Structure formats: C-alpha cells, structure tokens
Image (cartoon, coloured by chain):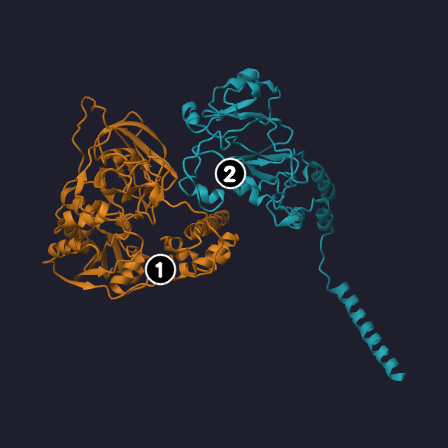
Amino acid sequence: MKTVKSAFKFKGGVHPDYNKELARAKAIEQMPVPAELVVSMSQHLGAPAKCVVKPGDYVVKGQLLGEKNGFISVPVHAPASGLVKAVEPRQGPAGGKAPAVVLDTTAPAPEGVDASPRTLPPLDWKTATREELLARVNDAGICGMGGAGFPTCVKLNPPPGKRCEYLILNGAECEPYLCADHHLMLERADRVRVGVEIMRKVLGECAVRIAIEANKPDAIAAMEKAFADVAGNVEIVVLPVLYPQGSEKHQIFATVGRVVPEPPALPIDVGCVVENVGTVAAIANAVERGEILLSRVTTVSGDAVAEPKNVEAPLGTKYADLLAFCGGAKEHPAKVISGGTMMGFAVPHLEIATTKTTSGLLFLSPRRVFQYSSQACVNCGRCVRACPMNLNAAEIAKAVEADDVQDAERLHVMTCIECGACSFSCPAYRPITQFCRRAKNSIRARIAAEKAAAAKAAAAK
Amino acid sequence: MSAILLAVLCVAGIGLVAAVALAAADKYLSVKEDPRIGMITAALPGANCGGCGFAGCDGYARALVAGTAPNGACAAGGDACAAEIAKILGVEAAATEKRVALVKCCGTRSEAIRVGDYNGICDCNVAAATAGGDKGCAYGCLGYGACANVCPKHAISVVDGLAKVDKRLCIGCGKCVKACPKHIIELVPAAATIHVLCANPDKGPAVRKVCGVGCMGCHLCERNSGGKEANHFAFQGFLAKINYENPPTDEQIVAKCPAKCMSVDPHFETGH
C-alpha cells in the first residue's frame, strides 16, 4: 500500500467556494426516527420498485416495501416500524412524482405481530460464494450513494467478456459544503476496508485506487491506517482540489489515466468500476452484519442553519424534520438545495423526503443567493475553458436556444455530465447547463420514441 | 450581314432541336401524378400547420390519395374542406366539428401561489423539469409559453402568467396540446361556451392551499344543471369535467360556482 499524487490532471474545471468548514468538524450524529416517513419507490436509477404494501398494513423495520422491478432496479425496505398511512405519488428532490409509502412510525404494533426488526443472516465473506455476495448486495437494496443511484449489484456484475482491472473508491467529495463522505472515511474506515475486500472477491482480483482530494488530509491518514496491511496492488491517490474531481469519468482519468469513451460506453469498458465510499461501507454492513440499507449520512449545512451537522437519518425523513434536528433555521433561507450547490436541485418546499442518494441538504441565506438575469453570449470562451468534457458549451447553448437540437447533438451534447462548470464561469449568467440538459432530454425522448416505433414495426411484422 | 444571319440561324436551330427534345421527353419520360393530389392541395387551407400529422398540406393530400390518411384530419379546414375532399375522392364525408384549444387553468399570478423564483430558460418544458415548475399547483399552467411558441397561427398569448387562446385564430391543429408539459390543453368544440378552467383532481383543501380558483369537486355545477341524470358533467377525482358530447347551456351555473373556476367562453377574444 502506498500513497501517491495523481499523475493526470484533466482539462478545465472550476474552483467554487468550498464552505466545508461549516460541517467539517461535526461527527456523524444518529437522528431519531421522526413521526412520519415518506419512503419513495424511486430512490435509485432505473425502474421504480413495485410497491407490495397497502394502506392500513403494519410494517416492521427492514420489511420489504417495494420489490425489484426489472434488471436496473433495487428493492426498497421500511426504514422503521410503523403503519402505512398512504401509498401515493409524492414529489421527489428532482421534481418528478413517484409512488411513495407514507409511514406513521408512532403507531403501536398490533397484537400478535413480531415487532423485532428484520435483518438478513450475516455472511462470512471469506467463505461465501460470489453469487451469494451479489445476491446479498441486491437484497439489501444497495445502490450508488454518490448521487446517481446506479444499482450496485449491476455494477459489480460486469457483462461477459469485460473484466474489472481497477476498483476505484470515490472519496473526492468535490461538491461544496458536503462532508458526509469525509466523515464516513474518518469514522468508519474499517467498514470501508471490509467493503473493499468483499468487492475484490466479487469482481475478481483487481487493483484498488482510493481517490481523495488533497483538502482532506485526516481522511487520507485514516485510509492509510485502515489499509496498511492489505495485500495486493492498493494505492491511495491524492487528487488536486478541483471541481468536478468526484465525477466518475474524471476520477478514472485522475487515478489510472484512462478515458471513458462517449456514451453509451461505461467505465467497465475501460476496465474500471467506481464506487462511492458510502456504498462500500453499506456493502460491508450488508454482508458482515446482515444490515439492510435503511439510513444514510447526509450533510445538513448552509449559513441559514442553526447547527450544521452530518446526520445519519432514516431514509424517507422529510427535510422539515432534518432541519428541526439541526436546530431549525437561523433566518428564512432564500434557497434550499438537495445535494451540493453545483449539481443539487433547488427544492420548493420541505415536505420532500431523503432518499438513498441524498448526500446533502443546504439552506442558504439571501446573502449567498444571487438573483440574475441572463444576457446574450459575449463569446469570451470561459465556459469552453471550464468544461471538463472538452465541449464547446457556448455553441451548444446557442444551438439549443435557437431550437436546433440536431446541431447540439453534432456538438456532442450527450457527453455532457451536467457538472455546472460552464454556468458557474459564465460572465453573462447564461444557464448553459440547463440548455445542455434540455437538449439531452429531448434527444433521449427522440431515441426512446424511435425505439418504441421500431419495436411496434417489428411487432406488426 | 451574313455573319449576323448565320448566328441567328444557328441559335434558332439549337432552339428548335432543344424544343423537339423537350417535347419528346415530356411525352415519353413524364412522371405520372394523380391529378387529384393537386386538386386536394388546392382544396386544403394551405396553412401548412402540420396539425394533421403530415408534412404540410401537400403531404396530407398525397396521403389522402394513397389511402393512408383519414379524411377529416384537417382541423383547420373543417367540414367544408372535408366535404370538398370527399367530392374529389368520391367518398362520403364524415361530419366533423370545429374544435379549438382550451387551456384548463385560470390560476393567474394573483390567484395561484408560486413556490419559487424560477430564473432559468423561458420554456414550460424546461421549467417543468426543474422541480416540477415554480407553481404551487402541480397541474397548473406555468405560463412560459411552450404552447404559444409552437402555435402556427400565433393564436396563443400569455397574459398574467396564463396562456390564453384566441378562438378566432385557433385552427384546432392540436400542436399546443402536444407541447404542454402539464397536459392541460384540450381541443373542445368551438360551439361550447361553458368551460371548467381547472385540471387539479386533488381534494378541495389541497387545491385551496395552492390556488384561489381551483375546482374542489363540490358537484354544485352538476346539481344546478339538472343533476347526475342530465349528464352534463363527469368527475375525475375531485375535478369537474364538462361532457362536451352534451355540454351544459345554462350560464347561471357559472356564476354559482363557489370556486370561481368556471367561465363562459374564456377564449381571449381581443386578438392581435
């Protein structure tokens, strides 16, 4: 095991104010179960889970609420015991409505119901087979906890013919304000280590790269200590502090110098699997202790919060309850962001609940929020210089503004990772990322429509 | 003198040969086109709005002659146009009714609450993709003009955060219906005068929380128009919907609506 500096620096990137000092020194706190939980069936990427409970049912902590619905999907479990009040569409952090189970956790357990939490039998990962371990990751409902929520059992099971050479642990946490992964590495280093050993067993022998930004020396030290006696090719790669260092593709480039081709190519096509440190710890808990994924660490921060904290809250905790646990708001926040300031979503109210991918919840005062009106592009090229994906963001935005999505596609808009570096650097305050997202959405819709039409034509034949 | 004569004769000769060649080409190499295509194109309104689903009026005419499109798909031309096409094609004309677009929302900026300050691209589809839009009501008109942008007749204008259709300009092509991310635009018979301007099927208190003029599903309009038997209304959840097969005619029920979400001929008539 050795610690090295990253040998590769990607082009572009920006330096937003990190503001991490607000929650950096706060140890992870357990949040008590709130009176009401709203558990979404769509906490991951892919098809929403199929709800298997109905209003009036009493569910026990760890009981299945929604079953896996398709290949790219994960099951959802009850984060606490309680009575199912309703099963209805609720707004998620990104705006779309998805079916959700509303749990009243204050309801007493009816007579004759075994109220002890459901867990899975612990497995000894040293003797368990690969299939057993994969099934466990699936049954525990684990998906990528960095933000995208890709089902982990799919990632750990590469298609035939593709082999994982590098397992990359993402501990960069380049989003401003967030410290959840940082504290997880500090306080649960042993969990991360066990998780890595399990993943190496599932993926086959592979080199391990632990990527951490240079501004977290204590996390680097904690990882060095935890992995000191691990055999094999293990390196801790210290990354320069630069946004978006935590993006999957940039992490791969920074640690092993490989470039992931344009979509639909995946990291496995260049022999890499990237997992967030939180996901790795969840895998360790699921295998060694049989724990189902029922809570996650979320950073509640921002200058409008009384006490910024790193909170381990049950999944489905409403934002209002999270805010109350952190001492409420010091002043009326001008903006509430679910996630980090660069890629997170502004949310309109606090009735929205946490999911497996909620890494942060930020309450910003009016002094931190800038109201702008966008102007015409001045052709300065700052967005082009800032774009970490080598895109001509200015031209793409102009094309989309003129409703020419085809031209945006020609300019490779589908490669955009929506990191927000272009909008951040634009002196004319143009919503460039939003233009890219709009183009990507309409291209995706067109591709889906073409596929549906082709399937229909094939069926007619 | 002879030089000029020679030149004139040469050019005249070339002209003669070319004329003969062209005449021969026209006779032997011509592409036979059904004359009905031209006749139907002339009968269609020529707005090239695309509302029928084909590329312009000529595309629709070709599809009609080929038998791949139904007669009556041209909403802009209406019955008169369909009858003329039927005459050309030698088939029976199915009676169609002139339909116009109706935006089923009346939550203006003062009536419907806004939950955020949307500051991005001015387009409903983009706004709807950003936390569902800034309107408190998840079903309401966002007022960023996605429908107005696609209207071939410029019949839609956004007034006080609400899209309004000019009934006289609307040709019922249905492009706005497809463009609206909230799916609240409907094609209704132009003859109908009473409309419910709300699309929120939630319970009354939930609607009241987000909008001052939302339908609460109290059924008063149904009772005032002769009860359930009269069959003027259908209810979806807590939302009254006009049965346009059998629309109510008594304008008194509009004034009696406690939610003030009904209107007599809400189409924006002042035009441009």
**Residues flagged by tags 1 and 2 on a common chain:** no
> Mark 2 Cα within 10 Å, few/some/many (few <14, many 20+)?
many
Seen from the viewer's position, the closer of residues B224 and A391 is A391
Residue A202 rendering spot, x and y as whole percentages: 20, 54
Q: Is residue A6 left or right of residue A461?
A: left
Amino acid bearing label 1: Pro
In the displayed structure, would residue A277 be above or below residue A79? below
Residue B88 rendering spot, x and y as whole percentages: 74, 44
Direction left: furthest residue = A229
Query: Hey, which quadrant is residue A141 in on the image?
Result: top left
The residue singled out by tag 1 in the image is: A388
Q: Is residue A451 left or right of residue A134?
A: right
Residue at the spot x=51%, y=29% of the render?
Answer: B198
State the SS at label 2. loop
Chain for colour cyan:
B
Seen from the viewer's position, the closer of residues A361 and B12 is A361
Chain for colour orange:
A
Q: Which mark is residue B143?
A: 2
Q: Which mark is residue A110?
A: none
Seen from the viewer's position, the closer of residues B11 and A316 is A316
Q: Is residue B91 visible?
A: no
Distance from disc 1 to disc 2, alpha carbons, whole Å, reads: 35 Å
Q: Chain of mark 2?
A: B
State the SS at label 1. loop
Residue at the spot x=63%, y=38% of the render?
Answer: B170
Location of the N terminus of chain A by quadrant is bottom left
In the displayed structure, would residue A377 be above or below residue B144? below
Q: Is residue B169 left or right of residue A303?
A: right
Direction right: furthest residue = B1
Residue A57 rendering spot, x and y as whole percentages: 27, 26
